[in-house]
Image: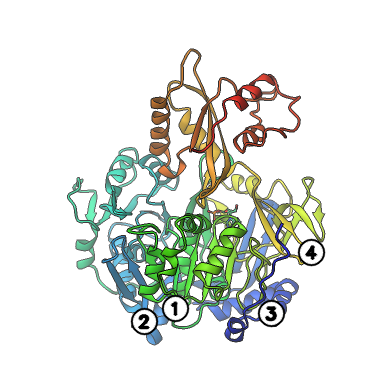
Amino acid sequence: MSDQKIYPVNPQIAANAHIDSAEYQRLYQQSINEPETFWAEQAAAFLDWHQPWQQVLQYDYPKGEIQWFLGGKLNVTVNCLDRHLEKRGDQVAIIWEGDDPAHDRQLTYRELHTQVCQFANVLKAHGVQKGDRVCIYLPMIAEAAVVILACARIGAVHSIVFGGFSADALRDRVIDADCRVLICADESFRGGKIVHSKLNVDKAAKQCPNLHTVIVIKHTGHDIPWTTGRDIDYREAMQSASTDCEPVMMDAEDPLFILYTSGSTGQPKGVLHSTGGYLLYAAMTHKYVFDYQEGEIYWCTADIGWITGHSYVLYGPLCNGATSLMFEGVPTYPHPDRFWQVIDKHQVNIFYTAPTAIRALMAQGDDFVTRTNRSSLRILGSVGEPINPEAWEWYYQVVGSTRCPIVDTWWQTETGGILITPLPGAIPLKPGSATLPFFGVKPAILDPDGNILQGEAEGVLVLTRPWPGQARTVYGDHARFIDTYFAKFPGYYFAGDGARRDKDGYYWITGRIDDVLNVCGHRLGTAEIESALVLHDLVAEAAVVGFPHPIKGQGIYAYVTLNVGIEGNSSLKGELKDLVREEISAIALPDLIQWAPGLPKTRSGKIMRRILRKIAANEFHDLGDTSTLADPSVVEQLIANRLKLP
Ligand code: 6R9
């Protein structure tokens, strides 16, 4: 491993950074030794409270109970909007850059505030009250910020469903959270192509009996089917809505949103985040991890349908009064220099993206980068999956011209914000390592039996105590919350990732140790994809594993057993892909589908995925113990017919 390579802290960055090395040490020690004092100070510094809390923290990990700032009251939009109006009402809050480079738009804090109040009134007029769940199925358009914050203004719990999910995936999420109001666009643009959002909503809505209102933001303006009585035109509704809307004061522990994410078993779970702790953690990490300075232009490329979009496109930056850029398009449209063009156009200072995008752009060659200027850039960030040192070096050398520290940020939907990361003015970098824990975060590495390993070690990554941004439950299924995160290693939060700690105490995330795939930085459960495949009448059984993919990080390898007497062919593969597209999304399409007359199973019938993973990764010389297999000959057969990327 290349953990010897160290990039010292850039002295120019350190000189003006919020946090330098000494300050990191001091604050980290305080956050661990006196957590309640530390978090009380931060909560007072970062947020405006309507009513102070009585107790900083109360928790019981084995019961999955976590509460922060008990008794405190606040409203998220007061913190993200109202309190900024006096000082920065005319500052741009959101820069929107369309899929088409000719389309862009800016919203000041004052404009955003006005529109949020208006839309909050629209929601109220359609019966939405505090605690109600509202589904948001939107592309990356500026109005998304308006509707998300409008929910928070009145205490409605938003559930954002990524705009790339299918009608069926949308239906499942609407039903699980019992959303009665949904907000969507007519259509959107992605890489010059049209995405038919409203058609998906119409299809999903047929099976959502409680969904009574669909508010449609006309973005492309093309003709779309309309259901009178159910569908509401966003702009018409906004026109007649009052611009006054009192914020509803929320308990710190009241839910702010639900976000579905994939686990190793079953259907996606609705991870629920709180109001006070989540907002504090998003704001604080945004300021310190990106060293956000007054007046800077900050761009996180994540979609609002993922946690990164929640915490680092909207809540963190807006709470800090930042200017946040929202991008509708893709990195390669109209040309593979689009990211760098946008950086020059809007003079972006801080840029946060995913390794899969970096690898894809690296493959296009340096010219697309070097023909742009990028001198506004100061800090670069990475999130979503481990960044391989080659991609890290390219990002550092070519994109950042060796001037910009890279913050490789490890975290999850469930953690609400960044947990392990460099701070740009404080922590020397090692390409491929997420480095050290953020304030208040205490990681540990366990052996498989749950013993804490000291010093240099590799094993299971856990967190030994709560932080304010941690998820509070799985919506409607607290038992699943306990079971997934707190049961396996009692007393700890189990992240599902493996990690190594080197001699300097730096953490190297080694990837998921459960059946969760990370494809282009998107989390997918193998179980979900398998369920989609077995829906086909001719499929008897399916097993899905990940395999190393040069651009996507992980690719999807599906082993499919057909019914007796059925021959596999390419048109059947096409039908299986269609099923996955319909059930989940195009992001879940298998890269390789191998017809498997049999799957390696234990005598008790458990599929041995370890073996399937090795075959898919082309590592079949070392299959480990196969003696427990019911029929070892299936392995030979699978190896003989294994597939590779073209
Ligand atoms: C924020 C986000 C979480 C999973 C996580 C891990 C992987 C994220 C990473 C990383 C290595 C990083 N992951 N960031 N692995 N280095 N910097 O991505 O949330 O979609 O819930 O995915 O992503 O495996 O467990 P989410």
Residue of label 4: 503
Q: Residue at x 48, y 75 (%)?
A: 377
Quarter of image, ligand 1? bottom right
Q: Amino acid at mark 1?
A: Gly
Mark 4 Cβ and ligand 1 under 8 Å apart: no
Tag nearer the camera, 2 or 3: 3
> Crowding at label 3, few (<14), some or many (≥20) Cα neighbours within 10 Å?
some
Q: CA distance from mark 2 to mark 1?
A: 9 Å
Dot 4: element = loop
The residue at the point 44 percent across, 48 percent down is: 177
User: What is the distance, in whole Å, between disc 4 and disc 1 at their CAs?
Assistant: 39 Å
Amino acid carrying label 4: it is Lys
Total number of numbered discs in the rendering: 4
- Identify whether 133 is placed above or below 380: above
Q: Quadrant of residue 253?
A: bottom right
The residue that label 2 is drawn on is: 91
- Amino acid found under the numbered disc labelled 3: Ser
